Amino acid sequence: MPGLLSLDLLLIAAAAWLAIGLCGLLAARHQALVSQVLFPAGALVGLWVGVTGIAALGGDPQTAVLAIGLPDLPFHLRLDNLSATFAILLGLTSAGISVYSAGYFGKGDVAGLGTLCLEYHLFLASMLMVLLADDAYAFMVAWECMALSSFFLVTTDHKHEEIRNAGFLYLLIAHIGAIGILLCFGVMTGGAGDYSFAAMRSQELAPFWTSAAFLLALAGFGAKAGLVPLHVWLPEAHPAAPSPVSAMMSGVMLKTAIYGLLRVSFDLLHTTIWWWGVVALVVGLVTALFGVLYATVQNDMKRLLAYSSIENIGLIAVAIGLTLIFHAYGMDALAALAMTAVLYHCLAHAGFKSLLFLCTGSVLHATQERNLGKLGGLIHPMPWVAWLALAGIIAGAGLPPLSGFVSEWLLLQGFLFSPGLPHPWLNMVVPVAAALVVLVAALAGFAMVKFYGIIFLGQMREPALKDAHDAGPWERVGLVWLALITLFLGVMPSTVILRLDAATRQLLGAGLSDTLKEQGWWMLAPISAERASYEPMLVLVTIAATLLLSRWLVRSLYHGRVRRSSPWDCGYHFEGPRAQDTAEGFSQPIRRIFEPVFRMQRHFPAARDTQPFYSVKVEDHFWYWCYLPIARLANWISALIVTLQGGRIAIYLMYSFITLLVLLMVARP
Amino acid sequence: MISISGFLGQAFAILLALFLAPLLSGWVGQCRAWFQSRTAPPLLLPYYMLQKLFNKDVVLAHNASSLFRAAPFVIFGCMVLACAIVPTLSTDLPFAPAADALALVGVFGLARIFIALAGMDIGTAFGSLGGRREMLVGFLAEPALLMVFFTLAMIAQSTSLATIVETLAHRELVIYPSLAFAGVAFTFVSLAENARVPVDNPATHLELTMIHEAMILEYTGRHLALIEWAASLKLYAYSCLGLALFFPWGIAPGDDIVALIAAIPLLVFKLAIGGFLLAAIETVNAKMRIFRAPEFLGTAFMLAVLGLLVRLLLEVRT
């Protein structure tokens, strides 16, 4: 379009989302109109954002000034390669989720669909503005809009007390994080009072202050992303929210925090100190291990996915840490490798985690049940959802040939170069950290098998599950779209990375495109073909070809006869569904091996119990070690302060008098 | 570029794997019987089994899903791919760039997920028990295996299996202590991954001790045949991998036909020795309780990390 820059197109998209939201509010009474017209329109805008982002990659940064907001404080906006990358993520993922929402919110009676439509599209528009903001003021306004709109989305079903509590916790931690981000921006202005990002870029800060800014950014954005110990809101808020909202928060909103962290640590702060990387690496590893271990022991399918999101954010933080370490030592080609892993995992996780959250939405709609212990055998009534979820769990377990494996592979390749670090002990310790990354990936496989096997396979644990229905047409389109993204990212990594390279180059001054361009589109060899290579298309084609060929050969050489009978089960009388593993039973090995990690309350049946029962409740140590003590401390302090309030006016006057005296003494010229 | 001879070599390696893998299983079974003073089953027993199973009807449980029917083919495909990547006869494999050592672990992981899910599909107590245990062994073994590959990759400066094998085959005859650690760790992992004593027992039908057998209890006919064949392919792939990494001599370096043909009897000889040793290990060890497996594989992991550290501390001259 002549005359219109990509930035303008994105601003139009944000305005379009706002307009759709407002239409939703006005047309709140017409459920069919809101769900079948407005949400698909939102999906089209999402596609628009994605395509514009792809087109903007590799171009020069574009800036604009929007004269809204306070007088003399306009919004500075900027579209560069980093924001374009995350705009693609936002646009393409939200397109799938919005189409799905058309079906999800079109069924049954959704109270307040009009407000929900407004909040949802405001959420989308504010996330886009976060990516485009070029000064701290615009950034914080968009950031707070995002936090508030998502808070209202989480508490859509606010009649339940637990959902209100979850929403409150989310709001609290979002604001603790926002304080961190605000302070970080404050430090980066260096006292000059100019809050535009351009001014921050040109600030020369003392090393102490750059480190302070980095740590504040890590804490502030970490609270939004779910880094330990600020992760506690995720497993509460995700199950509380409607599934498309969980998908949006987990798939897209967590990535805006990653965007912020990348923006601050690689763009606004231009020096990097090696121990920042170590901090990010350690925090990331703890987060990833913690997340995956807790994911394996969850019995609520959405909580399981929420903990799995914590794990993935941890892996992204590990990759950021590795990038920082390489960057600090000027090993920019390797830093580019690790940065590619960061960006790729953001994209991959957005695709497969949204897919899985939407699948839980379909299951929830079909069965009204989130508890894994009451599901089972849903592949029979819901084949679409089951087969698409299979793509999600293969990617989630980080296995070839889907998307999760590519970023994991890149990350491990990065780790393989860490012995070359010129630091005496880092070059020993960092490679061993790779072992923990692999442990996390393998445990993720365990969690994903539990998720899939207990929901979709086996016998139905409740008789009512027979009446479950498969996803409707809108929902199928959304799920298929996200599964296609997962597949595309899985088998075409080279094509994607060549595009993403513009962002890596902008942040680090180096990229992978020089080596990748020499090879074919089917091959991923970031350093050289002798060093390491991965051809996912060939992997996929070989497995598929062997599958078809062996099936054809067996059928033509022998036969394809099938008889049905009851299961053999080692000759035992075939037990009912209660004989299968429960969700608790499946994760028993993990609870046993990693016992100290969990806070467990268990009840074992005794030998003479007439009504024996077993129960286990797993809780988060952080509540007891960290949050409850802080809450008690806050209560204690406020109780102390209450004693100041005597209720007599003479005492208050005395307080004022003392304050005045102190001020007079302190403020003496 | 893909050369014709390289392509033929690749096709030949796959066919050889398909043919030799059941033979290897038969040979290990025979050696085990000798060690235990039993009358040995015929060497070709696995072929008879495959033939018999392919001829039989498939008996499916009433509630078997489409995933249950697809899984054997997927697992078979994964194992054929694994055998195509591992350098058995020559390092000039057109498929070698498809997946390096890390991706090979991923391919095994994919097969593992499918077999565990298939085990859970019918909804019997044993099936989900087997699936859970298989995933347990998987997450314990995978990090150790990856650490072994990391050590080797640091020696060869590459994660490509072909490059690693070439580097190791043409090094001067110095003993790398790190390789010794890695070799022991690899042996431990291979035993666990291939459902062998002391972690699992391929001959068991005592319900409570089963891992691999528990998952495939409901499989019959051609499905079972493919799973058995895939299991023997996995054993073959792991054996060839161990031989190629730790005893790489005799593998043809390029598309040299003579060296390729000479490599075949050498490979068969090495596999025979390896199978004999495997049977010996299985005979002198007892199957351990399932919750001893973390200790066993934890040891493997520590050995592999030790190998890596030895490599970084002692062998890297900078």
Image: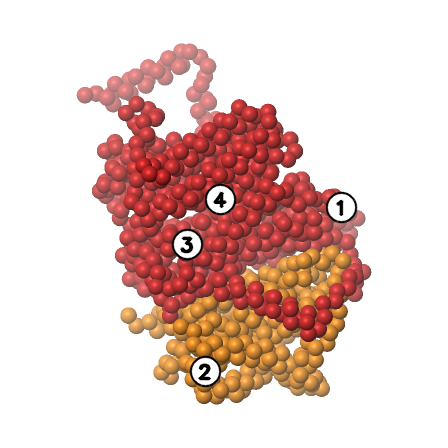
Chain colours: A red, B orange
Could you tell me residue B81's position as x and y percent?
53, 70
Residue A54 appears left or right of A584:
left
Q: Amino acid at mark 2?
A: Ile
CA–CA distance between discs 4 and 3?
15 Å
| Disc 4 residue crowd, few under 14, some 14–19, many 20+, Cα 10 Å | many
Q: Given this view, does label 2 or label 3 mark the residue nearer the observer?
A: 3
Q: Given this view, does label 1 or label 4 mark the residue nearer the observer?
A: 4
Q: Can you say whether B260 is above or below A268 in the image?
A: below
Say if residue B131 shows up in the picture.
no
Q: Chain of mark 1?
A: A
- Identify which residue is drawn at 55% across, 33% down: A37
Instruction: Indicate which disc residue A496 carries.
Output: 3
Q: Amino acid at mark 1?
A: Pro
Assign a secondary structure to mark 2. loop
CA–CA distance between discs 2 and 4?
48 Å
Q: Which residue is mark 4?
A: A93
Q: Chain of mark 4?
A: A
Could you tell me residue A641's position as x and y percent?
44, 24
Q: Name the quadrant of the C terminus of chain A.
A: top left
Q: Name the quadrant of the N terminus of chain A.
A: top left
Q: Nearer the viewer, residue A310 or A585?
A: A310
Q: Can you say whether A246 is above or below B161 in the image?
A: above
Q: Can you say whether A54 is above or below A519 in the image?
A: above
Q: Which residue is mark 1?
A: A463
- Total marks shown come to 4
Q: Nearer the viewer, residue A10 or A354?
A: A10
CA–CA distance between discs 2 and 3?
37 Å
Q: Mark 4 and mark 3, same subunit?
A: yes
CA–CA distance between discs 1 and 2?
59 Å
Q: Amino acid at mark 3?
A: Val
| Labels 2 and 4 touching (C-beta < 8 A) | no
Q: Given this view, does label 1 or label 3 mark the residue nearer the observer?
A: 3
